[in-house]
Image (cartoon, helix red, strand yellow):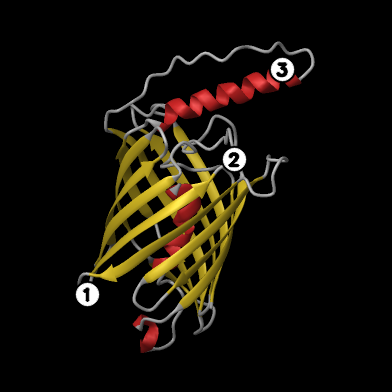
Amino acid sequence: MRVILTLSIMWMCSMSAFAQTDSTAEEKRTTFTVGATYVNNADYYGQKSEGTMAYVAASGTLKLKPGLYFTGTGIRLLNDSNAVVSASAAGIGWQFNLGKKLTADVSYSHTFYPSRSPFLQASNPDNFSASLSYAYWMTTSVNADYMMGKQDHDIFLTLGTEKMISLGSFSPKDLITLTPAINVTAGTQRFYETYVTEKRLRDSVLDVLLPGLPGTEPTITTKTNTSFDLISYNLKVPLAYNRDHFVIEAAYQLSVLGKKAQTGAGTANSFFSFSFYYQF
């Protein structure tokens, strides 16, 4: 569940925007970072569920000096009255340098979903990920995700670039940054058939429980998509206030879906998030 659950904690593993005041900023050290995030709608590679899924999340990352890190995340959907935690994830990864400007990252995470979860990717709880990032005037990266479940599996490939722009500061100890980023994602969409199946099961149960609404037996008409297609084009604009130990960030993302995206070909989705991270 990389985009919903682990994007923020992966960001915490590689964040370099914290304001620094001396040349020791690049020294490796053990860090522990906690974060809290509000998102107006769950984002899955620029896609979203049929219903609005606003949520709050809490996350933590322990990163050791050699680059090994451990992550944990909990999510609560704001429209979920049945559980304190709507989904949670735990992961392990290793970030290392291949050169002065080239960085690699490999990781594995497992997401715990309740039965009949409304998340798009709930059928694929295991995520194996690998990425390469090259930092020059801009930072360009390629990321591959292998999402696996008991019955389904999907592969996603994302190519992106971003540029951190300094907007000034209020004092020598802080920094205001704008980091526009664009990326393109392609992949398979086997997850979608399971999503539609589970949604119709949930809807049929709701029809039975609500008085006056007839219960209907769910019928599945979707076909598993095994082709590798262009899924989304994404533009994200995060505005952040950085200090030595914490970051406050507001971000807007516009995603235009490809012609073969099963969640809404050719449509545009908007996402807004507000996050706070503190590093010990």
Mark 3 vs mark 2: which is more N-terminal?
Answer: 2
**Label 3 Cα crowd, 10 Å radius (few <14 / some 14-19 / many 20+):** few
The amino acid at mark 1 is: Lys
Label 2, secondary structure: give it.
loop
Give the number of the disc on residue 114.
2
Label 1 vs label 2, nearer the camera: 2
Label 1: few (<14), some (14–19) or many (≥20) C-alpha neighbours in 10 Å: few
**Residue at mark 3:** 208
Q: Which of 5 and 110 is in front in this view?
A: 110
The picture quadrant where one finds residue 217 is top right
- Asked whether the beta carbons under mark 1 and mark 2 sit within 8 Å of each other, the answer is no
Q: Which amino acid does label 2 sit on?
A: Pro
| Dots 3, 1 in contact, CB < 8 A | no
At label 3, the amino acid type is Val
Query: Mark number for residue 100?
Result: 1
Is 71 drawn above or below residue 204 in the view shown?
below
Q: Earlier in the sequence, mark 3 or mark 1?
A: 1
Is residue 187 visible in the rendered structure shown here? Answer: yes
